[in-house]
Image (spheres, rainbow, N blue to C red):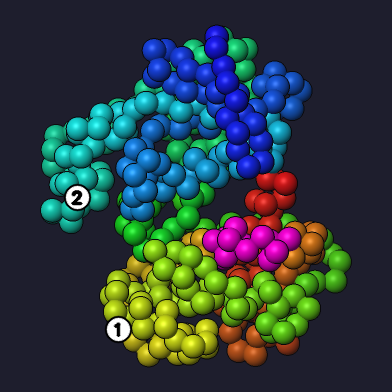
Amino acid sequence: MNTCQLIREKSRMTVSTHFDDRIQMLRLGNLNSNKRPLIRVHSSCQFSEVFGAKDCDCASQLEAALAQIEGHGCGAVLYIQQEGRGHGLQNKINIVRNMQLADLNTYEACDDLGLAHDVRCYQQAKTLLAELSVRRFCLLTNNPIKADDFRPPAFDVTTRALRGNMSIQNRAYLSSKHKFRHRNLFVSAENLNDTAHNDVQPVCVDSTNGPWGELSNFSRYPVFEDGVIWPTSEHLYQAQKFASHPLREEIRREPTPHCAKEIAHGHPNDILSDWDDVKLTVMYSTVKLKLNQNPDVKEILLATGLREIVEASKEDTFWGRTASGTGYNYFGKILMLIRADMISEV
């Protein structure tokens, strides 16, 4: 088996090809050590991974898998050439065209064309893992059908969630996947309430000028998304409530995050109908984007260790916690959830 190295920013992975180029394997470390390796079985998506399409999460899931494997120190991505959930590139083009013309989701477009929802096959991936004596591993997936395909007695498999970023472009796509049983694509209140922390004095994010002010959504760290630069992550978060490009642009151009929030609150009838279902996920994605694009803020978050993070608020009991201790503190919990993900990647 011929191999070469893939030179990435944080690792050098071994690359090999199998089954007449049907599978490329990107491998790091010893897959047969006592440490359970992380395995991602990933189907190709030329639209997002090559051409930069933003209406799915395939590229961001692939990058998230590679980052987790690098942080873990051992694992592999099995990159399978099966476009369009196994239908092939021509059928994928037909599916996407049908979605765009008839305003359908992926599953509805397949039904309309008389195609099965998913015809991907993982047999060659299973054969390759067996040939490498990799039977005990952690599968990076949100897809319960894929997880069921790697079941005992052939494999001893645990699973770990793998979230891409939610954006205005891929929200409908992720919502359709969520409806069809893909777990952990959305951040839920249950996810956040289960976030662990220790009993040391909490980190209090009280203002942008306080000791942990860089973590605030209102701090002056720009974020690049949707082809433009947003002055703060709060600007981007508020804009994602709306489909209207002019309104989104008006919010982006506001001089302060407080002004951006006021503009958004002034258009309650224009807010997208699914907002309550996705706002935790949008906040998670927005904050994660800020941290990934501003490494110094990421280091500040990691410096909090395992301490509880609390956003102090005078009256917002959803995102913060008041002086009396009242509030869900979902912004602080989102920071802790992202921190837990990042610790696993360090």
Q: x and y percent of residue 86 in the render? A: 30, 28
Q: Of the residues under marks 2 and 1, which one precedes in the sequence?
A: 2
Amino acid type for the residue under numbered disc 2: Met
x 41%, y 61%: residue? 167
Q: Which residue is mark 1?
A: 269
The reply to whether discs 2 and 1 touch (Cβ–Cβ < 8 Å) is: no
Tell me if I can see residue 265 in this picture. no
Vertical order, 223 against 262 (above or below) = above
Badge 1 element = helix
Residue density around tag 1, few if under 14, some if 14–19, many if 20 or more, within 10 Å: few
Q: x and y percent of residue 117 in the render? A: 27, 36
Q: Quadrant of the N terminus?
A: top right
Residue density around tag 2, few if under 14, some if 14–19, many if 20 or more, within 10 Å: some
Tell me the number on the disc at residue 287. Answer: none
Query: Which label sits in the foreground, 2 or 1?
Result: 2
**Range drawn in magenta:** 287-299
Amino acid type for the residue under numbered disc 1: Asn
